[in-house]
Amino acid sequence: MVSSAKSLQAFLGAAGEVVLVNVREAAGSTPREAGAWMLVSTDAIFGTIGGGQLEFMAIDRARQMIADAASADLLDVPLGPEIGQCCGGRVKIDLTLADEALRAEVSERAARADALLPHIYLFGGGHVGRALAEALALLPLKVTVVETRADAVGDLPESVDVELTAVPEEAVRAAPAGSVFIVLTHDHALDFLIVAEALARGDAAYVGMIGSRTKRATFRSWYLREAGGSEEAAARLVCPIGGADVKDKRPAVIAALAAAEVMRGLAV
């Protein structure tokens, strides 16, 4: 994902007056939770509070504030038929014309959010690795592709980091706690070494390996016999990634299924 702090700085640099639209309270079924926010200028927006009529109302009110040079306002909106939304909840929204102090506060908030992004390590920049990098780059994640081959990491999304190394297992050891490791190199033996290293950590949020049930069984046999692994650790491996119920093996399809699987795992 492109750094929200970096994108925010670009937005603020291009905008004139901006209004911070912040969800103060969210009761019942609502598009976003309390604390969700967005910025509104006269001709652009940054972020979202969920879209729909609620967001349109907030944008209109924010732009009216800019036109009137008003400093603050409050929206208290029931999400019912009268505004064309059937969520059924109720939302209170603070609108504040952003001075320099508030701009700095919002920038710090975005930087803190960036620092908390889950780390995703993709081992292998082949067809599926590339497709998965492109899918994950759209999500609130910090994505790194780890490769041994320099010619396999061209044309990746700008926000995706690349680590070229002859010893990819070292990237596993250096990763922060709670990281996600997805292994899809060009070499099954290398896949096994990286997966064993990831399982040995014991603190990974997700360890996945591309392949079939047969490949998983082969890994398990090697892992228990040769790598000193345990059944408990082996059970934490996700293989095949993305599940086996969809038979379409095109890289973009595998990537979409695996990305959804990772996000579900991180949300638990």
Image (tube, grey):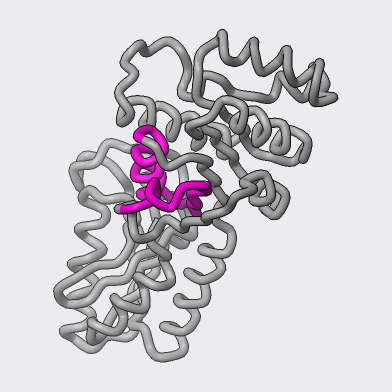
Q: Is residue 71 left or right of residue 122?
A: left
Residue 225 image point, x, y percent: 81, 16
Residue 23 image point, x, y percent: 42, 60
Return the residue nearer the eye: 229 or 152: 152
Q: Place residue 62 in its image quadrant.
A: bottom left
Return the residue nearer the eye: 260 or 193: 193
At a point 22% along the width and 48% down the height, the residue shown is 52
Is residue 128 found inside the magenta-colored segment of the image? yes
Any part of residue 178 in sight: no
Residue 223 image point, x, y percent: 75, 21
Return the residue nearer the eye: 126 or 89: 126
Q: Is residue 9 left or right of residue 207?
A: left
Does 69 sit above or below residue 88? below
Image: magenta residue range:
127-154
- Viewport quadrant of the C terminus: top right
Q: Is residue 170 left or right of residue 127?
A: right
